[in-house]
Image (cartoon, rainbow, N blue to C red):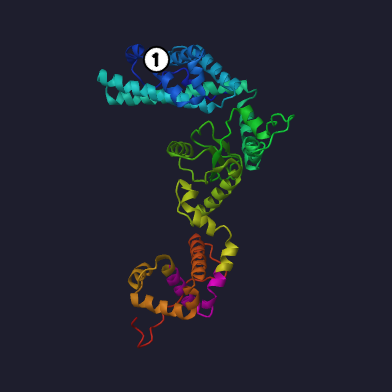
Amino acid sequence: MVQSAAASRARTQAPGALPQELASVMWPELPVVAEEMMQEIGRAVPEYRPLLEGSYRTVLLHCVRQNLTSFVELVADPTASTAERDQLCRRLGAFEAHEGRGLHCLQSALRIGARVGLRRATTVGTRYNLPASLIVAFADAVFAYTDVIESLCREGYVAAKGGGEDAWESQRGRLLRLILAGVADAVGTRRGSGPADGQRAPADSGPAPPSPLAELARRVGWRIPERVTLVALSPDAGRNGLRLPGRLDEDVLAELGDQRPHLLVPGEIDGPRTAMLETALAGRRAVLGVTVELGGAADSLRWARQALSLVESGALPRAGLTRCEDHLVTLWLMGDPALAERLAVRQLAPLSGLTPGQRERLVDTLRTWLTTRGTAAQMAEILHVHPQTVRYRMRALKRVMGAQLGDPDQRFATELALRAQHLRRRAGTRPPGAVHAQGREPELPRGHEGG
């Protein structure tokens, strides 16, 4: 497999700009740190618990110690050989592949190990009164070293799966396409299938054959989740495929060569997942779809893409990451513009006889009243007019729409129509026949200034 120049250089350089004499402080800590890492990994990664409690514990402890030893050796001597460590990491990745686990388990274990190492470094730094700047440099070195270890494990994993990186990513892309095509429904059916209560299964019935999705997931070491969140990304103009500046978590499926690139994130996008996406996207606009059952992945992506188009048009506020969950009403109202416009035509028909300017002003007042139910003074502040003007407009609205405003169902339909119309106006996609307000506010007839 072709290696990147940066990764190759990293394996022959010291892990960061650390003073060589720091190695003498680190050597005595390694046995305790290795045991702490094993205990933390066993608690946090359930897949590894049986291994850490069985005969494989000695083998895995040797892997941890070897990686720690190589780190300290590179601090002491930046020219130290890493051949033994590199071979060990590739074999560890191959072991994960043969065991049928995804790399996300190993990735989690490496992050836990890094945290334990940093925790120990803080304790040692306090004991030896080391400067804070050195602890920060040590943390940078640990994260860089962890990236190298993960890259080596991936090499072994991909090689054991029988293909290069491109072939492996191609299979993961096909896995994502199968999920979006609805093949996940077949997996769900098999998971929940079985005889009904009180019925016996046929005597000759055997285990159901694996679905194409389950078989492909097993081949690439991806654990099928129950719930997923799809992410729509803004594409790169004039490029064949999108390249992200940062790294995604190992269990995230990506389709970056599509004209509308997207990701699948297992489970909900919590705080750590959000931080991962922000780092990987580095400011690129993206919309997080609704977290759904695996069979609803296509819906999550459809909503995310719809929200992304609304962000780009200005109907939704522009941000690096936008969550569909925060804008469900807007998505619903903008889901069928033609139908929303038909509703607006019907609900605002009583105003059709007015001039465009009068109609526009009354519509703005009506929308404000429906959404706030405020007093004339409160509405006047929102509309930037005099309270007396608001009272005048409300009397005009009650004259032409009185019965409609008094009926709860009609009032609700009118509010929906006006909200959708307002969103389209904000996005710059005004419905046919709509015009901006023109002219001045009509003069109030004498004798009608009050009320």
Magenta-drawn segment: 344-367
The residue sitting at 55% across, 16% down in the picture is 91
Would residue 347 be visible to someone looking at this image?
Answer: yes
Determine crowd level at label 1: few under 14, some 14-19, many 20+ residues with C-alpha closer than 10 A: many
Which image quarter is the C terminus in? bottom left
Q: Residue furthest left?
A: 129
Q: Position of residue 379 (x, y in %)?
A: 37, 70
Q: Position of residue 260 (x, y in %)?
A: 59, 45
Residue 402, placed above or below residue 341: below
* In the foreground, 16 or 347: 347
> Identity of the amino acid at label 1?
Val
* In the foreground, 332 or 317: 332
Residue 283, placed above or below residue 417: above
| SS class, disc 1 | helix
Q: Position of residue 106 (x, y in %)?
A: 50, 24
Q: Residue furthest right?
A: 204
The residue sitting at 53% across, 30% down in the picture is 250
Residue 261, placed above or below residue 126: below
Q: Which residue in the protein does label 1 denote? A: 72
